[in-house]
Image (spheres, rainbow, N blue to C red):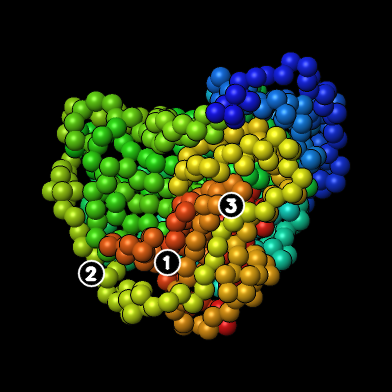
Amino acid sequence: MLVAALRTTVATSQVPPKPVPKSMPGMPGMSGMTDSSKANRPPSKPAARRDTMAMDMPMPVPMPKGMPMIPGLVGLTPPVTPFLPGAGMDVKRLPAAKPSQITRLKDGDTLDLSATFVRRTIKGHSFAMYGFNGQVPGPLIRVPQNATITVRFHNRIDLPSTVHWHGVRLDNRFDGVPGLTQDSVAPGGDYTYTVHFPDAGIYWYHPHVREDIEQAMGLFGNMRVDSPERDYYSPVNREETLLLDDLLVNGDTLIPFGKEAPDYALMGRVGNVLLVNGEPRYSLRAKKGEVVRYFITNVSSSRTFNVSFGGAPIKVVASDVSRFEREERVPSVVVAPAERYVVEVRFDRPGQFAVVNAIQAINHYQGEFSAEVDTLGAVTVDAAAATPDYARAFATLRTNTEVSKGIERYRAYFNKPPDKTLTLTVATNTLPLATVQFMNVDTAYFAPVEWVDGMPDMNWLSTSKQVRWILRDTASGKENMDIDWHAPRGSVVKLRIFNDPKSFHPMQHPIHLHGQRMLVVARDGVATKNLVWKDTAIIPVGSTVDIIIDASNPGAWMLHCHIAEHLGAGMMTVLHVD
Ligand SMILES: [Cu+2]
């Protein structure tokens, strides 16, 4: 195939130009202050910048083994100023990131939440990164259902920021979207949020400013909302929280981000180190027969995970905003960026259970699909039996009739014509010629879901200056923020989303709606048999997905792709619930 031939011929005459070291002017508030005891004070003088830390764009970016860069791309760099948070800081002097700690709050309580610099050591390399309250992941905020808490956010990083309370149907003023519900919080600034939790389940918080940088650098944490019902979930021996992430590392440094605009705009930044709770390896010691309830959140910028537990039986219980109508046994659980799943796993025999991400990779150059298994960690199960023994409860697949009853009044809308239809597509300009030529061939085949980045060079070189990801309103032809979409409060809206496989570079999009809950009622005309309330739904390439929105929470709410770089490349609109 033409492209494969292109790929295997490395031009030796093209020597990458020596990158010009860029200083990083205009990044205010680089305070170097990370001690949490000082977190409430404004930043003082900037940390000294050492010349040896001046930043270069690494050349080339990490490529999969045996895959050289396309000759036409060798020597190119993305048309943005490279930016790495904390460049020039003495990493050794930063406080080491602490693991997430549980913060139990009750109705009326107040939490101080500071975004600061921390030192993270990953596979022997230390990086200046971000954390909330010195922790990565940030504190696990645990609250009773219907609690209202106050969160005093303190921005002590070097970029403007906010906090978005993902999946929480709260008061619109506190949704954390700059330019829509608030101004972004400047470095050194503060903002007070009131967060009300109407729904039980697992949620997460993260900035809504340059997610491609801030989230990737460690600003994320979970909120767990406890139902007052004692048997809301089945009895288990243990509960674990898994935040799935990845990080793009190049030797002993991170690949810089684009200062003015996100790079990796085509596919999003897909890391080459997989992380669970911020660490490259998850481990747990359990007893024979132990049932573990896992609360799983995908906090990565772009990667979709497919998680399983070494053959141990898995029961899927809940997702974003509710439990499922019926519990089901599943071989694995697919989690797109920003989605959550609650699963129960029974480790029924002694031994090692590998926690893996098993996916189908696509090699864009050869047009080949191949199975790939990454180990995320391991559960070591001892011979001693767990007590109590929850084998019987685990074997029971519960029916949550309350969930079905709650959905009943929406069923009349399932088969009506859509109120709104969106097409997902992309527009590009001034991409390198080699990339354009390649894409014209590449689009001849596509994967419904791209699990890995099979074209890191083209992806790296693309920025949101050249790539515009699009939500297009079929009726008006309007795109992204030009769509003027209103729904009366209390209405039920049927939204149909079609992911156009004929676009320049088709890709799956995890579409997230703020402040409301929604049901995925059909995929490609096939009705969903087991419903669950969601706030994020993956739209595979070529698919048509029907969504019912419960537009019950007034305000201006973002609807956007949760791939951080796609959001950064414009893939967003607003639903006004009047
Ligand atoms: Cu997207």
Residue 14 rendering spot, x and y as whole percentages? 78, 20
Residue 145 rendering spot, x and y as whole percentages? 40, 66
What amino acid does circle 1 point to? Asp
Residue 260 rendering spot, x and y as whole percentages? 78, 47
Q: CA distance from mark 3 to mark 1?
A: 20 Å
Residue that label 1 marks:
546
Q: Mark 2 CB in 8 Å range of ligand 1?
A: no
- Asked if residue 554 is positioned above or below residue 479 in the image, the reply reads below
Q: Element under label 1?
A: strand
Q: Element under label 2?
A: helix
Q: Nearer the viewer, mark 3 or mark 1?
A: 3
Residue that label 2 marks:
401
Q: Is residue 481 visible in this depiction of the protein?
A: yes
What amino acid does circle 2 point to? Thr
Q: CA distance from mark 1 to mark 2?
A: 23 Å
State the residue in front, 470 or 56: 470
